[in-house]
Image: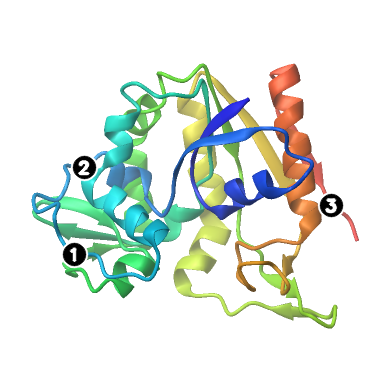
Amino acid sequence: MEFDIFGSCLSRDGFEFESNSHKVNQYFSRSSLVSILQPPLSKIDVKIDLESNFLKRTVKDDLTKRFKLYINNPRSKVIIIDLIQERYPLVQLEKSWFTYSADYRRAKLPKGTMIKGYDQLEMYKKNIEDIAALFQKYEYVILHEANLAETYYNNEGDLEPFKLYDKDNFFIENGKEYYSLLKENLPNVYSLSLNGFKGAGDHKWGAAPSHYENEYYEKYNEGLDYIVENKKDYSYNHSE
């Protein structure tokens, strides 16, 4: 089966494991759902100076709001969403809002008025019906209720805390509200929830709060199969 993905690497990386028999069609990353609702940047030929085509594309996708155009006629029947990227602040330019991701910042794009924390959550709440309407062309949505890891196993197998920023801590504490609001407004949604896992220092992309131990992705793939086959929510709690 082919899926579209709107979210973080936590929803994408499981497809690289042998336990996953599905494919990714379109992958949209490093964008806030509130940002996607907004008008695109008028100067879409703006230079984005980053080291890979993937990073350049993700920033440009947010500036041009490509996802909002794509979902008028999506090429997949099902989309996987996670909301990890709602932790990024929003920046205002040309009376529109854009996702102030690490890549946006590294590309040295303009920094206008910013919104974050509870003010950003309120903006999400006010726009939740329009956000939910973005996904009406899909047969159903798999809501991957992912959050950030607070600790990880280092290369020696010892548990260490991540260095977390204010935006990370805010999402760890308030991410459930983001997910609950979206679930309440989506008629065609199934939840995939995995809890109790730690980050991995030997992850192929390096140690980060959104890079988990391998078993996380194995259970994620198990959850995808379960939802596709049964059209029911999937939840797993990992214990030491």
> What residue lies at 30% left-to-right and 48% top-to-bottom?
61
Residue neighbourhood size for the residue with mark 2, other residues' Cα within 10 Å, grouped as few (<14), some (14–19), many (≥20) = some
Q: CA distance from mark 2 to mark 3?
A: 38 Å
Observer-nearest residue: 88 or 128?
A: 88
Mark earlier in primary sequence (2, 3): 2
The label number, if any, that marks residue 238 in the structure image: 3
Which of 207/119 is in front? 207
The image quadrant of residue 73 is top left
Q: Where does the image place residue 143, in percent across and percent down from the top left?
A: 57, 35
Label 1 is placed on what type of residue?
A: Lys
Q: Residue 14, percent across and down?
A: 68, 47
The image quadrant that residue 201 belongs to is bottom right
Kindly state the secondary structure of the residue where label 3 is placed. loop
Is the residue marked by circle 1 packed among few (<14), some (14-19), or many (20+) residues within 10 Å? few
Q: Looking at the picture, how far across and down is residue 110, in whole percent?
A: 17, 69
SS state under label 1: loop
Q: Assess whether mark 3 and mark 2 are in contact (beta carbons under 8 angstroms).
A: no
Q: Is residue 30 above or below residue 131?
A: below
Per the image, the residue denoted by label 1 is 47
Q: Which residue is mark 2?
A: 38
Q: Residues within 10 Å of mark 3 (few under 14, many from 20)?
A: few
Element marked by disc 2: loop
